[in-house]
Amino acid sequence: MVYPVLKKGSVEKRFKDAAEVYASYKVDVSKALEKLKKVQVSLHCWQGDDVGGFEVKEDKTLTGGIMSTGAFPGKARNGEELRADLEKAMSLIPGKHRVNLHAIYLESKGKFVDRNEIGPEHFTEWVSWAKKNGYKLDFNPSFFSHPKSASGLTLSHPDKNIRKFWVEHGIRSREIAADFAKKLNSKVVNNVWIPDGAKDIPADRWAPRERLIESLDAIFAKKVDSKVKDAVEGKVFGIGSEEYVVGSNEFYLSYAITHNKLVCMDMGHYHPTEVVHDKVSAVLPFVPELLIHVSRPIRWDSDHVVILNDDLQMLAKEIVRGNALDRVYLATDFFDGSINRIGAWVTGVRSLQKALLIALLEPSDILKKLELEGKGAEKLAMMEETKTLPFAAVWDYFCETAGVPVGSAWLNDMVDYEKKVTSKRK
Ligand code: RNT
Ligand code: ZN
C-alpha cells in the first residue's frame, strides 16, 4: 500500500486556521514550536537489535530480568548496520536528537574485550558518526548478559572480586561518557541500571544494599568532566527479581538526593497503577535534574513501543506545566523485536513529540486560574475541550517545516528501506 502524501500547501493552510483557534485561548503556537524544536530526545540504540550488542562472543542471550520478544527479520548485526538504521529513523523524526548507547555496543575489531577492559577506543566509530551527523551521544554501562551477572547480582554481589569487576566496568563507562562529552562538546547522560535482586524472600535485604552503596561510591569517586551527568535507575521488580530489587526506587531516590545524582525514572518500573507523571514535581525539587526512560509497560515492564496514550500525555504536561523541559532528559527505552524496528523507533519518538506539542499548546494559564478560583466544572470542561483542539495541524506543520514526511507518509520510507535494506539481512 502507498501511504497518503498530502498536497503541497494544504499543511500550511490548516496550520494557519489552527493557530487562530489556539490564539483565541491565548496560546502562541510559534512559541510552542520553538520550544518543541529544542527538545532533544535520546534515541536508544538497543531497539535496533533487540538489546544484543556487538561483543565478540558466542552467547548473546539477553539476561538481567529484561526481555525482547519477537523475531522480525532484519535486525542490525553490526555497528555499520545499526548506524544506518538509526540514520534512517532520524530522517523520519523532526528535529535534531541524541543517540543513547550501551556499553555492549562497543566495536573491538573482532577481538573479545571484556566489560572491565572497555575504553573510548572502542567507540571511535560511534563518535565520528555522531560528529558527522550532528548527533550527541549518551551512555549506559551494561550490567547484564554476562557470565559474571549470571547469579543475578553485580554491584551488590557478596564476592568482592565480582563486585570489583563491575565497579571497574562502571568507572570505565564513565570515562567513555567523559570522552564523548569532550569530543562532541556536549552533556552526556551516563545511566546506571543493574539487575540485582532476588526471586524469593531474601534472608538479608540489608547487606546487598550496603554493598551497592559502596560500589556506587567507588564508581563515582573520580571527578570527571562536569558535562557527564550520572543517573541511577531503580525498579520495582524484574523477571527473576520479583521479591527483592537491591536498587529499588526508594534506594536510588535516596542515593541520588544525597549524592547529587540524577534520578532515572522508567515508566515501566513502578506498580501497574502508579504513574510517573505525578513524580516529576515531587522529585525534581530535590535533585539537580531528572532522566525519564520513556517506555510503555503492559501488565509488567514489557517495554512496548511508546504511543500517544494518557500516560505519555500526562508526563509531557507535567514537565511543560512545571517549565522543566531544560531539567528533564527524555530517553526512549523500549524493545519490541516483533515489528519493523525502524518503525518502532519512529513511532515512539514521534508519539513523544506529539505529547510534548499537545502539552506546549495547552492553555495552562487558564486552567491554573480556574483551579485557583475554585471553578472546578469549568476547569474540567476546559481540560476536556482542549483535548480536541486542532493540534494535528500544528504537528503536520512542524514535520513539514522540519523537512520530514507529514502524517503516515513516513511509512512509505520505512517500507522502502525494509524492502531494499533490512529484509536482505539473513
Ligand atoms: C531495565 C531498564 C534499563 C534497560 C536498558 C537496556 O529494566 O529499563 O534501562 O531497559 O538499560
Ligand atoms: Zn529503563
Image: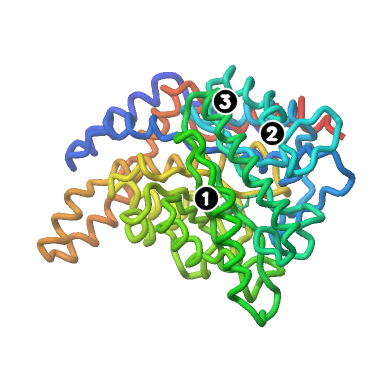
How many residues crowd mark 1 within 10 Å: few (<14), some (14–19), many (20+)? many
User: Which amino acid type is shown beneath numbered disc 3?
Assistant: Ser
Residue 91, labelled with which disc? 3
The residue tagged with tag 1: helix, strand or loop?
A: strand
Q: What percent of the width, then of the height, locates residue 48?
A: 69, 39
Residue that mark 2 sits on:
119
Identify the residue shown where x is 71% and y is 59%. 64
Label 1 amino acid? His
* Of the image marks 1 and 2, the number of the one nearer the N terminus: 2
Q: Name the residue nearer the viewer: 313 or 181.
A: 181
Side of 4 relative to 354 (left or right): right
Q: In percent of the image, x 37 and y 48: which residue is there? A: 288
Secondary structure under the numbered disc 2 in the rendered image: loop
Please provide percent x and percent y for residue 17: 27, 31
Q: Is mark 1 within 8 Å of ligand 2?
A: yes
**Gap in angstroms between the C-alphas marked 3 and 1:** 22 Å
- Cα–Cα span, label 1 and label 2: 25 Å
Tell which circle, 2 or 3, labels the residue nearer the N-terminal end: 3
* Residue 353 visible within the image: yes
Counting from the top left corner in percent of width and height, residue 4 is at 55, 30
Question: Which residue bears the numbered disc 1?
Answer: 293
In screen coordinates, is 37 left or right of 204?
left
Which numbered mark, 2 or 3, is in the foreground of this view?
2
